[in-house]
Amino acid sequence: MKKLDSAHPTWRAIAADDDESSLLLVCAALDLFAVAVYEARNGLEVLELLTKIVPPTFILLDISMPKLDGWETLEQIKATPAWSNIPVIALTAYALDSERERAHTSGFSAYLIKPLSPSALIAEIERIVRE
């Protein structure tokens, strides 16, 4: 586990997952590192949040969600100039190489497989945000 000196109190994130336990785990991990988190349970909620808040530092987006899935949500984010440069990280329970490749070519910044350790999650986010 990283020390608190690697906290990120200026970071803002949107975490989207329709599975409550997965969303709670991700939010708890981000909270350990002082990241402000806005929660969403589907892609429509993500897009609504993006219209209401200061653009987040990054978005964690579950691939399989109701109403608007992660693929469609990413497409709309990337098509909107004000949001197109926000790093979007796919979160999924599917560890398929074909899905990982699709995520990469679709514009996701990373493809992370659940469950995640808090330190691994933050390490990957730090790498992406620095790029």
Image: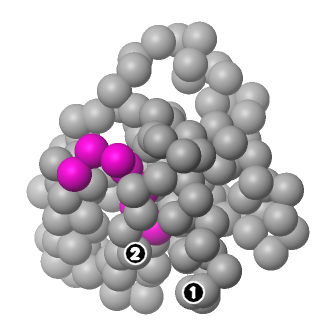
Q: Is residue 29 visible?
A: no
Query: Which amino acid, by three-letter code, is at mark 1?
Result: Ile
Q: Which residue is mark 1?
A: 53
Q: Position of residue 54 (x, y in %)?
A: 60, 88
Q: Give SS at disc 2.
A: strand
Q: Is residue 68 above or below residue 47?
A: above
15 in magenta: yes
- Give residue 87's quadrant in the image: bottom right
**Residue at the spot 75% in from the left edge and 46% down from the top edge:** 75
Depth check: 97 or 6 in front?
Answer: 97
* Placement of the N terminus among the 4 image quadrants: bottom left
Q: Position of residue 64 (x, y in %)?
A: 46, 34
Position of 70 with respect to 80 (left or right) is: left
Query: Which amino acid, by three-letter code, is at mark 2?
Result: Tyr
How many discs mark residues in the rendered view?
A: 2
Position of 32 with respect to 66 (left or right) is: left
Q: Residue furthest front?
A: 67
Q: Position of residue 18 (x, y in %)?
A: 35, 47
Disc 1 and disc 2 in contact, CB within 8 angstroms: yes
Position of 51 with respect to 36 (left or right) is: right
Q: CA distance from mark 1 to mark 2?
A: 9 Å
Q: Which residue is mark 2?
A: 38
**Residue at the spot 55% in from the left edge and 75% down from the top edge:** 49
Where are the magenta residues, as a range?
A: 14-20
Q: Is residue 42 above or below residue 86?
A: above
* Placement of the C terminus among the 4 image quadrants: bottom right
